[in-house]
Amino acid sequence: MVVLAVASILSFVACGGGNGGNGDSIEGGDVVVGMYDNRYQYTEIRIPVGGTVTWVGAGRNPHNAHDAEETWSTQSVFGSPEMLEGDRATLTFDKPGRYTFFCTFHGNAQGAGMSGVLIVGDE
């Protein structure tokens, strides 16, 4: 029984569970997303209409978050496309929808590289 529990814990950690590894998702009203070197902490974000996402620079390189449809970006509130370690930009989303986002330095609007999806409202 103990071996099974240890194996489950190791599997959880190896898959990025609990540490915000690449490919993870998060859901909530006010979400914080780290922007690490060449990856977002969460690649699927679900928030209600009126919810917020705070993007935080957490890597050695500059990063940002930019909507593929160009309706929002961290630059609009931060004032610069380059967010460095410790920099923060909070965006409020009042319109429901599904938004592909990416880092203009390490991804693209087609969802390659450093990218993810933000789902606002029920979808």
Image: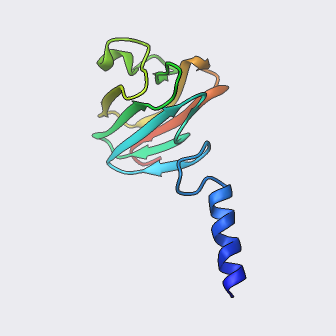
Please report the residue visible at 64 percent of the width from the left and 22 percent of the height from the top.
110
- Viewer-proximal residue, 7 or 91? 7
Q: Residue 30: percent from the left, percent from the top?
A: 31, 45
**Residue furthest to the top:** 80
Residue 122 horizontal side relative to residue 111, left or right = left
- Viewer-proximal residue, 3 or 94? 3
Quarter of the image for residue 82 reads top left
Instruction: Please determine whether, in this image, residue 70 is positioned above or below residue 46.
Output: above
Q: How is the image coloured?
A: rainbow
Please report the residue visible at 61 percent of the width from the left and 52 percent of the height from the top.
16
Please report the residue visible at 63 percent of the width from the left and 63 percent of the height from the top.
12
Please report the residue visible at 38 percent of the width from the left and 37 percent of the height from the top.
96
Instruction: Please determine whether, in this image, residue 13 is positioned above or below residue 53.
Output: below
- Viewer-proximal residue, 102 or 96? 102
Q: Residue 22: percent from the left, percent from the top?
A: 61, 42
Quarter of the image for residue 88 reads top left
Q: Residue 56: percent from the left, percent from the top?
A: 40, 32
Q: Residue 39: percent from the left, percent from the top?
A: 59, 32
**Residue furthest to the front:** 60
**Residue furthest to the bottom:** 1
Q: Quadrant of the N terminus?
A: bottom right
Q: How many marks?
A: 0
